[in-house]
Image (cartoon, grey):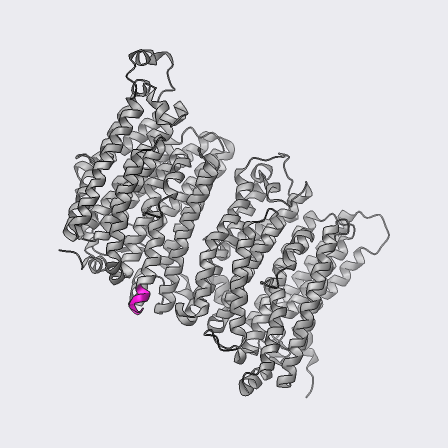
């Protein structure tokens, strides 16, 4: 078999652009001259945006859709849309970084963001266990560095270390699960695995392998009970890193795992009624995340930890999307994950800008935001209400399509149906803590009334995120239509 | 007829404009808001002039929205929705007139107020349940900020309680509608499409989904025992918001029951009928008795709202033609009268005396200090207890007669509620305005005058009085719209248990 390297080069053009961009950006910090950190930051962000734009421009027509390079990659709609979404979220993250970063080595930060993004885009299209693992790891390693990037704050180092330890252990689980799958089926290619699993049927070893893989997945999605890293990382990491971890990383991870679980291990899914397979396990993880995330969020005083627990609750809802993808395809899940990412990037962006002129850890640090910066308060209003799932914002439609899909699977009698009802009921609990954030920002008078200046790149990023949330909320078919 | 969708767009556009205008001056925001509300009301009246009453929903707009789910942006109108659109316009206009003195963050106040109004118009015009739900939720969120920022007594608690109850109710609705759609294999969220799918559900599931939908909507209508948000929320809210909450937003819930829950599941409704009717009857009497012993002027009105909304729910539950027509008429009537009562209590009295304790008010010769307010309150109070000549009379009478046809016992117990309503209304009129018999205090009233009633307040009060009187004297203006609408097959299915 002749190996079509030319095809591969074309298919991987986005990753090539990103890695090339990252290397170029690194050079910005190299010369020992007198350029200020601010100049270097702007230069490196400009280069980074250029690389992302190039990746986007080439990524969308990167060869024929469908399996490629002997089935290692799959440039289907899910893959390409996820690539585009991840690139967009990275652009927003860079915009926030440009406006807010005060670090001494800004170019390294931008380079790490680009490298992580390259990992994400590769995760989006990987269709082979080895490549999937490598993509996941290259993304994760960059994220560990990003979480611990702020050397001036011990919390950041703590976040980096916690994230790394949890990530390392879960990667080990995942790899072990992959190796068991290889042992069972003799292949690392998803299509072959799929046919093999359908032939051999369930076995105890397969269950072990699936559970191992789900541990890795649960970690990536910050689903309970693998969520413990999330609050600490969200609290300690620099805001722009936290934004990337909470948004693009999640979107790419979900795309990867939904591809792994349904087309790959679909035969071993078990059933919603409880037959052994990964489906009942995902149902349990999802229910645990929804309950734990929402109830734990109620008790939070730190806004970043609150966002972390809200992320855990959303992970539960996203897992419902993974379950429903078996019936309605990945469109609903993609829509939910992308619009959730937009809202989270935005929320962290607001926090990042507020942090420029003081602390922003406790919810009360947001007090009087509307008087200090109407722009930030307005954007935060959109992001938080979208997270709460209030129409006509995108967060509502995301929940709606996911829950509808889950209820369509087997009606109310199945566990997916109950899960959807549980998630809907919990959304009323969630509204409480989201309103607590908005109460500080919009109702309570400011403790410190100095106006906050919003740097132009950050303002642009926040406004675009808010505009996209409204746009996708009003015209959901823009995204959902891609998958029909 | 195609003017009606513009009520929604005009309100949302006005909301945005008021926010911009508010950054310049409070007056600009006020006038923008008033112009918006008047424009939307005028549109409604213009459309009403050409309205041909009929037994079906007349489509105004119908375009695909979310193809994958079969959601259409479908707006339609019939006599029932038109009645409530008129009410919304009147309540919104009066509400803005009664918020003329808002000086704190006026742009945001009127922006939220108009956003709420836009959502309400949208709900009344929706013929697609998804669209209805979207507008319904748009109407919920502004309430929190209106109360928490501009409210009074215990406002943050009241705001949160009210919004969480509303949102919990709407979650039930959401679960119900998705369930009906998914389990019934519907092709879309249109009322007709969902009704078709609902038939395919097994009966126990029909009852369950109906219970979700009805309970969800009825929470917002203040159905006993889920009414507790209403008094606290209404008391905490600023005047205009109380007027709108009691006057219009509670009607969203009742409207949802009538438009969505009952026609989709007529059999399940008939199965649950006695439970709903008894809850409504208990609500009428119970809330009335609580209103009787309140020490806070505004709480009396808050509980009286729950009691009067009980009549709406009783009318829906009885489901005879007369009772249903009465229920819709009562929605209109209570919307206008509750608005008036809240305006007198919250704006005319409280913002001048800075107390709502009846014991304090009793010591003041308010009828001398605020004669206009006294007259308006007496008129509104009489209208509220169902005096002939005001809109409450034909409405409650139709409901009681209609209910008698279905089950005399319900009507008898509910009629006790009317006596209680008479008692608490007369008590509060007497204590608040005519409490003091101290002639010296009355004579001294001129020495410490309160700020006079403004022109905006007078205009708002007269507008609402005119509406309740006009409909009271000539209920046919509305019944000519409502009764044909109830002839439609979907409502006939609901009524088939009742006597003709």
- Depth check: B332 or B300 in front? B300
Residue B361 picture location, percent across and down = 35, 23
Residue B17 appears anywhere in the view: no
- Depth check: A41 or A255 in front? A255
Residue B123 picture location, percent across and down = 35, 50
Query: Left or right: B60 with respect to A437?
Result: left
Q: Going by the picture, which residue comes out furthest to the left?
A: B500
**Please, is residue A436 above or below residue B170 in the view?**
above
Residue A238 appears anywhere in the view: yes
- Depth check: B482 or A212 in front? A212
- Depth check: A354 or B66 in front? A354
Residue B38 picture location, percent across and down = 34, 37
Residue B90 picture location, percent across and down = 31, 38
Query: Left or right: A41 with respect to B279?
Result: right
Snapshot quadrant of residue B64 = bottom left
Query: Left or right: A425 with respect to B211?
Result: right
B101 part of magenta stretch: no
- In magenta, the rendered stretch is B200-206
């Amino acid at each position: 078999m002749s190996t079509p390297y030319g095809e591969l080069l074309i298919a991987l053009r986005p990753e090539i652009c990103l890695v090339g961009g990252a290397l170029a950006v690194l050079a910005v910090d190299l010369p020992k001259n007198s350029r200020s950190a601010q100049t270097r930051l702007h230069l490196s962000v400009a280069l980074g945006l250029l690389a992302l734009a190039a990746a986007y421009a080439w990524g969308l027509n990167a060869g024929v859709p469908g399996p490629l390079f002997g089935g290692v990659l799959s440039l289907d709609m899910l893959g390409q849309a996820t690539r585009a979404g991840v690139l967009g979220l990275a652009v927003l993250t860079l915009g926030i970084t440009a406006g807010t970063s005060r670090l001494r080595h800004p170019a390294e930060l931008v380079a790490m963001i680009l490298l992580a993004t390259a990992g994400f885009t590769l995760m989006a299209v990987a269709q082979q266990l080895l490549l999937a693992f490598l993509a996941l790891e290259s993304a994760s390693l960059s994220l560990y560095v990003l979480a611990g990037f702020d050397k001036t704050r011990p919390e950041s180092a703590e976040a980096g270390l916690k994230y790394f330890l949890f990530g390392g252990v879960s990667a080990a689980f995942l790899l072990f699960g992959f190796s068991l799958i290889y042992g069972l089926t003799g292949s690392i290619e998803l299509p072959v695995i799929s046919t093999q699993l359908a032939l051999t049927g369930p076995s105890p070893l397969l269950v072990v392998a699936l559970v191992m893989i789900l541990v890795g997945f649960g970690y990536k999605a910050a689903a309970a009970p693998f969520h413990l890293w999330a609050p600490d990382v969200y609290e300690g990491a620099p805001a722009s890193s936290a934004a990337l971890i909470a948004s693009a990383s999640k979107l790419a991870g979900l795309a990867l795992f939904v591809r792994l679980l349904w087309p790959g291990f679909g035969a071993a899914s078990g059933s919603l009624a409880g037959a052994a397979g990964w489906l009942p396990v995902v149902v349990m993880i999802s229910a645990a995340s929804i309950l734990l995330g929402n109830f734990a969020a109620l008790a939070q005083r730190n806004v970043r930890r609150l966002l972390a627990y809200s992320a855990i609750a959303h992970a539960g809802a996203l897992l419902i999307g993974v379950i429903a993808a078996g019936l309605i395809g990945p469109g609903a899940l993609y829509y939910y994950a992308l619009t959730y990412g937009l809202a989270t990037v935005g929320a962290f962006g607001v926090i990042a800008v507020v942090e420029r002129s003081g602390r922003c850890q406790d919810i009360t640090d947001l007090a009087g935001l509307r008087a200090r910066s109407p722009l930030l308060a307005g954007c935060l209003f959109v992001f938080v209400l979208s997270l709460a799932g209030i129409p006509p914002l995108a967060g509502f439609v995301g929940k709606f399509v996911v829950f509808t899909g889950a209820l369509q699977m087997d009606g109310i009698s199945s566990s997916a149906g109950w899960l959807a009802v549980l998630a809907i009921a919990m959304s009323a609990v969630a509204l409480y803590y989201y309103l607590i954030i908005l109460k500080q920002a919009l109702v309570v008078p400011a403790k410190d009334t100095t106006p906050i200046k919003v740097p132009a790149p950050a303002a642009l990023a926040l406004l675009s995120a808010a505009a996209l949330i409204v746009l996708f909320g009003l015209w959901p078919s823009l995204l959902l239509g891609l998958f029909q | 007829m195609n003017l009606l969708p513009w009520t929604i767009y005009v309100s949302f556009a006005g909301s945005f404009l008021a926010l911009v205008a508010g950054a310049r001056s409070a007056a600009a925001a006020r006038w923008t808001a008033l112009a918006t509300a008047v424009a939307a009301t005028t549109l409604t009246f213009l459309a009403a002039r050409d309205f041909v009453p009929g037994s079906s929903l007349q489509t105004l707009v119908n375009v695909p929205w979310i193809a994958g789910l079969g959601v259409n942006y479908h707006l339609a109108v019939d006599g029932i929705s038109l009645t409530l659109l008129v009410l919304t316009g009147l309540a919104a206009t009066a509400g803005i007139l009664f918020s003329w003195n808002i000086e704190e963050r006026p742009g945001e106040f009127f922006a939220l107020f108009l956003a709420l109004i836009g959502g309400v118009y949208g709900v009344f015009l929706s013929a697609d349940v998804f669209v209805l739900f979207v507008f319904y939720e748009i109407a919920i969120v502004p309430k929190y900020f209106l109360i928490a920022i501009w409210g009074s007594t215990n406002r943050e608690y009241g705001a949160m309680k009210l919004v969480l109850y509303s949102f919990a109710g709407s979650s039930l609705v959401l679960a119900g509608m998705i369930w009906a759609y998914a389990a019934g294999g519907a092709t879309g969220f249109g009322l007709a499409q969902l009704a078709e799918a609902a038939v395919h559900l097994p009966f126990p599931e029909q009852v369950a989904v109906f219970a979700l939908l009805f309970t969800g909507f009825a929470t917002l209508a203040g159905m006993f025992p889920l009414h507790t948000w209403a008094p606290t929320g209404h008391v905490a809210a600023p005047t205009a918001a109380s007027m709108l909450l009691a006057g219009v937003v509670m009607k969203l819930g009742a409207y949802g029951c009538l438009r969505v829950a009952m026609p989709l599941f007529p059999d399940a409704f008939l199965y649950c009928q006695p439970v709903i009717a008894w809850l409504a009857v208990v609500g009428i009497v119970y809330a009335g008795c609580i209103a009787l012993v309140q020490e806070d002027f505004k709480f009396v009105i808050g509980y009286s709202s729950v009691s009067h909304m009980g009549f709406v729910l009783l009318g829906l539950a009885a489901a005879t033609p007369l009772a249903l027509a009465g229920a819709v008429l009562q929605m209109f009537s209570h919307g206008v009268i509750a608005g008036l009562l809240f305006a007198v209590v919250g704006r005319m009295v409280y913002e001048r005396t800075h107390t709502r304790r009846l014991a304090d008010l009793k010591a003041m010769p308010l009828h001398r200090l605020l004669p206009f307010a006294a007259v308006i309150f007496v008129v509104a109070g009489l209208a509220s207890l169902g005096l002939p000549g005001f809109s409450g009379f034909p409405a409650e009478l139709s409901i009681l007669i209609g209910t008698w046809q279905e089950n005399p016992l319900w009507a008898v117990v509910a009629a006790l509620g009317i006596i209680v309503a008479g008692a608490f209304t007369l008590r509060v009129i007497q204590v608040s305005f005519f409490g003091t018999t101290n002639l010296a205090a009355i004579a001294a009233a001129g020495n410490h005058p309160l700020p006079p009633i403004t022109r905006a307040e007078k205009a708002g009060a007269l507008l609402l009085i005119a509406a309740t009187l006009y409909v009271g004297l000539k209920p046919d203006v509305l019944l000519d719209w409502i009764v044909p609408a109830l002839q439609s097959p979907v409502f006939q299915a609901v009524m088939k248990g009742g006597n003709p």
